[in-house]
Amino acid sequence: MSSLLAFALPASALPASALLASALLAPAGCAHTQRRYNYAAEPDPRKSEYVLGPSDVLKITVWHNPDLSSDAIVRPDGTITLPLIGDLRAAGRTPGQLRAEITQRLTTFIKDESAIVTVAVSGINSYRFTVTGNVEHQGTFIANHVVTVAEAVTLGGGPNRFATPEDAVLIRVDERGTRRIPVDIPGILNGTHPEQDLPLFAGDTLYVP
């Protein structure tokens, strides 16, 4: 999937977060901080199985059992509903993990043979990230493939005339906590700092001061 599907949401639609606000208001990174940061330690979502989220569309097929096969949309609460099984949590799990639980639960109903289940993601709608600060078009964007810092700032229309893009910050919240990753956008674009063109995770915020 090479093309981007993107749109900006109005500011009123963006979730309020005191944690994010405090991160945005903290001092921007500087050049020597950027040189010290271990960019190689940041995980790459392109190297692991996709993690499902709300609004993703799934096609679940049970071999030789069309009545148990169905399409499902991950609801805002992170669950899906399947025939016989009922509700299952999908958000935060990979298709492989979901497939394993569906297979295990179906053994209660399918006695003659082992259930052969496939879980395919037919619509990616939960991969969202925010570009904010001094860019031409602030907003939350959706893409149908993993984007990098350079692609994200392009979706935001690029830095505006008030920007200091060499002091941009990628704000990430995960199991390791909240961290501010300094990124030099001009250095990324001119090839001086290719290691800083990190791939974004769903929920990341790129802030251009």
Image (cartoon, rainbow, N blue to C red):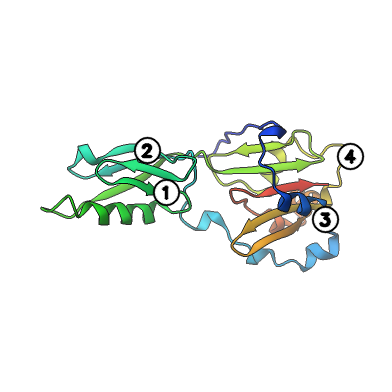
Q: Which mark is residue 90?
A: 1
Dot 1: few (<14), some (14–19), or many (≥20) neighbours within 10 Å?
many
Q: Amino acid at mark 1?
A: Ala
Pick the front one: 27 or 135? 27
Q: Is residue 25 left or right of residue 177?
A: right
Q: Residue at x 79, y 62 (%)?
A: 34
Dot 3: few (<14), some (14–19), or many (≥20) neighbours within 10 Å?
few
Q: Amino acid at mark 4?
A: Phe
Of callouts 4 and 2, which one flags the residue occurring earlier in the amino acid sequence? 2
Mark 4 vs mark 2: in front:
2
Of callouts 3 and 4, which one flags the residue occurring earlier in the amino acid sequence? 3
Residue 1 in percent (x, y) is at 50, 39
Label 1 residue SS: loop
Disc 4: which residue: 162
Kindly report the distance in space between the C-alpha atoms of the residues bearing marks 1 and 2. 10 Å
Of callouts 1 and 4, which one flags the residue occurring earlier in the amino acid sequence? 1
Of callouts 3 and 2, which one flags the residue occurring earlier in the amino acid sequence? 3
Kindly report the distance in space between the C-alpha atoms of the residues bearing marks 3 and 4. 18 Å
Mark 3 vs mark 4: in front:
3
Kindly report the distance in space between the C-alpha atoms of the residues bearing marks 4 and 2. 45 Å
Disc 2: which residue: 72
Kindly report the distance in space between the C-alpha atoms of the residues bearing marks 1 and 4. 42 Å
Disc 3: which residue: 26
Q: Residue at x 73, y 58 (%)?
A: 181
